[in-house]
Amino acid sequence: MSDINVIIRTADQTRKAEVTLDSSNTGADIIQASVDNWTLPTDTDYSLVNTTSGKTLTPNSRLEDSGIKSGDILEVQPVLVAG
C-alpha cells in the first residue's frame, strides 16, 4: 500500500482539495469524507469519477485497484434521478 496524491473536487468545482490518500481507500471512503468535510447534502447519492481517465469508480473498489495515479482529479458528482 502506498500514498497517492490526488485532487478531489465537487462537480460544480466550488470546492477543491489536494490530498494524499492511502491507496487502500475506497471510493465510498472518499465520497463520505467529502460529504462530511464540505457539508454536502446528505440526502443525495454521489458517485466518484476520475476525470483524468473518464472512469467512474465503484464505491467498494480500492484506489489501487481502480488505476488511480498521483495527479489524477477525482470528482464527487451527485447522482441525478430522473422522474
Image (tube, helix red, strand yellow):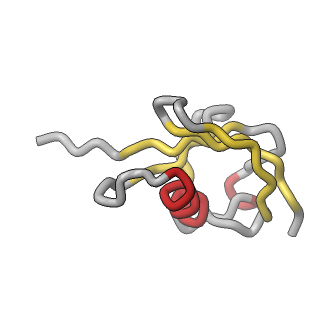
Q: In the picture provided, is 17 more to the left or to the right than 3? A: left
**Could you tell me which residue is drawn at 74 percent across and 69 percent down?**
24
* Nearest to the observer: residue 18 or residue 22: 18
Find the residue positioned furthest to the right: 2
Q: Residue at x 36, y 53 (%)?
A: 41
In the rendered image, which quarter contains the C terminus?
A: top left
Measuring from the top left, give residue 67's x and y in whole percent. 73, 50
Q: Position of residue 10 (x, y in %)?
A: 52, 39
In the displayed structure, 48 sits above or below 64; it is above
Q: Looking at the picture, how far across and down is residue 15, in whole percent?
A: 57, 37
* Residue drawn at the location 75% of the way across and 43% of the way down: 18
Q: Position of residue 31 (x, y in %)?
A: 53, 57
Write the residue at 89% across / 64% down: 2
Q: Quadrant of residue 50?
A: top right
Q: Quadrant of the N terminus?
A: bottom right
Labels in figure, total: 0
Q: Is residue 67 above or below residue 11?
A: below
Question: Looking at this rendering, what residue extends furthest in the left direction?
Answer: 83
Left or right side of 65 for 61: left
